[in-house]
Image (cartoon, rainbow, N blue to C red):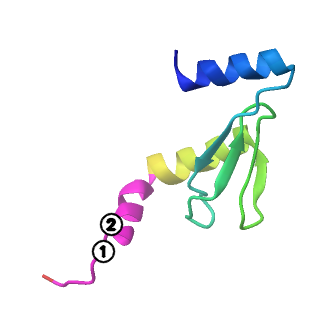
Amino acid sequence: MSNLGIAKRVCALQGIRLRIEVIAICPYCDTKRARIDISTGKWNCGCGKGGKLDSLYRVVESDYLLNNHKTAYWDIVNNKGVCK
């Protein structure tokens, strides 16, 4: 059984609600601090931004997929400062 399955059973036995949070890259501050709460359908980040998942999806889709921002992000993060 997977870890998620065990967690679901533990919550069912204890009579509590399962709350799953996902950490993602915030499209506004480009840090990995955006917390997505699946049970409520909302997200928030340490930079102060937050809202519903639909609005986050629209921003991420336009920013990362259409403008190929993910490639640029990893180029910036992995840049060693060495010129060729």
Under circle 1, the secondary element is loop
Residue 56 % position (x, y):
67, 46
Disc 2 vs disc 1: Cβ atoms closer than 8 Å? Answer: yes
Within 10 Å of disc 1 (Cα), the crowding (few <14, some 14-19, many 20+) is few
Dividing the picture into quadrants, the one containing residue 21 is top right
What number is the disc on residue 44?
Answer: none
Q: Amino acid at mark 2?
A: Asp
What number is the disc on residue 79?
Answer: 1
Residue at the image point whose x is 77% and y is 65% from the top: 48
Q: Nearer the viewer, residue 38 or 4?
A: 4
Judged left or right of residue 73, residue 1 is right
The segment highlighted magenta reads: 67-83
Judged left or right of residue 12, residue 80 is left
Given the current orientation, which residue lies at the most extreme right position? Answer: 15
Residue at the image point whose x is 80% and y is 15% from the top: 13
Residue at the image point whose x is 72% and y is 64% from the top: 46
What number is the disc on residue 75?
Answer: 2
